[in-house]
Amino acid sequence: MLRDAVAAMPWLVLAMSRLANANCECGYSVNKTSDPSFAVYTNLLENDFLHIKTDNVTEFGWRAQEYNVSAEDARGPYGKEFFIENIETNPLKDANAWTGDSDHGGDAGLQLWVRGDHSHGYVSGAEMATVRNDTLYGSYRIGMKLSAESGTCGAFFWFYNNSQEIDLEFLSHQFNQSQGAVNLVLQTPQSVIHGYDASNTSDFKVQSLDFRPDERFHEYRFDWSPESVQFYVDGKILQVMTNNIPTMPGRMFVNHWSNGDPKWSAGPPERDTSMTISYIKAYFNSSDTAQNDEYKSRCANFDPSKVCQIPDQTVPPDGSLGDANAAKTYFFTQDKDHAPGQEVFATTNGASSGVIRLFGAAYLPLLVALVSCIVGL
């Protein structure tokens, strides 16, 4: 079967072989872990932050957030405040490289800063949200290196409201000399009842990691379907949750913050500290009627050969240990004609990267054997 053959190939071979016969007119697919079926996603958003230099992340599908929350509302000894200037791009100096010196030193990528000066009663942090608010079931992925300074929370999450939310949250005070942890959370009506504290619900898991998330870049991912949310790190499954699965469309968020709460973020840190993002990739379905209609027009007769396989990241996307190509990951948006008829934003190195807007349809699980069928359109 194609699924078995593809699984045995390196990501580059996988991409080249699968894409040779498809221009992705009918979407993008990822295999499920529990059975021989796969899901088709018809929208795509990709950001290669190793090669992006901008003062305006909206060009790449994100809006920097600026607001504040009082200590009382933040439920900590300090308030939180978020500023646009705490989000900085720091691309590689060599636009054709995947590792090396960055524009202003340190790790290359998108930096989200938490500031060390909290003498005014607020801790200054960073947050951004997708321009699109129609994201539904899909596979959401981020290459990220967390802060090494104890006392912050770094998060990659999807949000509709306080009772429908999918979170990957990292507390730097949980990192020890050789290991770390990630908090896997579904915010549900039960967590709202418990004062927005999901730790008292069944949809909260502290997952230990056999590495420190602040030492190297790793890929963190969640695949969301109507039946489950599956969490991964570097392509390996960590946890599957099957209750209280969100059903509404929303936005993706990334943030880095502290409020000094000893039960959560701890801190705050005494010096400026950042977490750094090398890429974000999301393959998802849309709730927007007009985009669904456009997808049906583009893929009028569903053809599995026009669905592109999403390569899995199975090793840390990090070039710091001497492998110059380890940080190189595949982007459909850098492969000519693999986002047919879509709106593409260019990166600073001239490659076809940035944000793509494909047109969506409802969640579409397909058995590999049913390759000639169209389901749910």
Image (cartoon, rainbow, N blue to C red):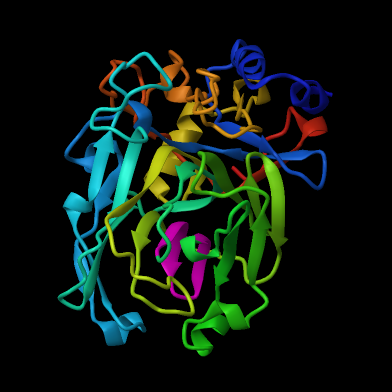
- Image point (22%, 52%), residue name: 86
**Observer-nearest of 176 and 88:** 176
Q: Is any atom of residue 311 visible in this view?
A: yes
Residue 159 included in the magenta stretch of the image? yes
**Magenta residues: mostly which secondary structure?**
strand
- The picture places residue 341, in percent across and down from the top left corner, at 38, 23
| In the rendered image, the vertical position of residue 152 relative to residue 108, given as above or below | below
Q: Is any atom of residue 229 visible in this view?
A: no
**Observer-nearest of 144 and 228:** 144
Q: Which residues are magenta?
A: 152-170
Picture quadrant where residue 66 is located = bottom left
**Observer-nearest of 220 and 374:** 220
- Image point (27%, 34%), residue name: 90
Q: Considering the image in quadrants, where does the N terminus appear?
A: top right
Picture quadrant where residue 373 is located = top right
Residue 360 included in the magenta stretch of the image? no
- The picture places residue 219, in percent across and down from the top left corner, at 55, 41
**Observer-nearest of 88 and 252:** 88
- Image point (57%, 32%), residue name: 28
Picture quadrant where residue 349 is located = top left
Left or right position of 199 against 161: right
Left or right position of 192 against 302: left
- The picture places residue 24, in percent across and down from the top left corner, at 53, 23
Left or right position of 308 against 65: right
Q: Considering the image in quadrants, where does the C terminus appear?
A: top right
